[in-house]
Amino acid sequence: MKTDRYLRVFYKDRLVGTLALTREKKAAFEYADEWLEEGFPISPFSLPLKKQVFIPAKDYFHGCSAYLRTVCRMPGGTFF
């Protein structure tokens, strides 16, 4: 997964995985190896617990990365 536009997803101080924005402005998610060993699926229907980069087939945001920038604001006011 490309690492220049990403954010790490945590649950109770445990790394769940990485959320990244693709060139096509789609959100991609990949579970961390540690989470795959002892975690649970954060969405059993669309994100089953397996080693894979999940990219939605449908463009739910219609190419609107502004929405992702709003919900994925990082400390200091920067965006991923």
Image (cartoon, rainbow, N blue to C red):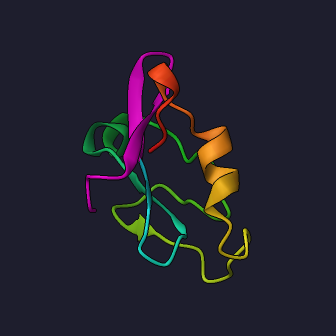
Residue at point 64% right, 65% down?
46
User: Does 21 appear above or below 4?
Assistant: below
* Residue 2 position in % (x across, y down): 26, 61
Q: Residue furthest top?
A: 13
- Decide if residue 17 is on the left or right side of residue 58: left
User: Does 78 appear above or below 30?
Assistant: above
Magenta-span inclusion, residue 5: yes
Q: Residue furthest bottom?
A: 57
For the image, the number of numbered tags is 0
Magenta-span inclusion, residue 3: yes
The residue closer to the viewer here, 41 or 71, is 71
User: Does 73 appear above or below 68?
Assistant: above
Residue at point 49% right, 29% down?
74
Q: Quadrant of residue 30?
A: bottom left
The residue closer to the viewer here, 5 or 45, is 5
Instruction: Name the chief secondary structure element in magenta.
Output: strand
Residue at point 53% right, 70% down?
25
* Residue 7 position in % (x across, y down): 41, 41
- Which quadrant is the C terminus positioned in? top left
- Decide if residue 57 is on the left or right side of residue 16: right
Residue at point 33% right, 62% down?
51
- Which quadrant is the N terminus positioned in? bottom left
Which portion, as a residue range, is magenta?
Answer: 1-18
User: Does 26 appear above or below 31?
Assistant: below
* Residue 24 position in % (x across, y down): 49, 78
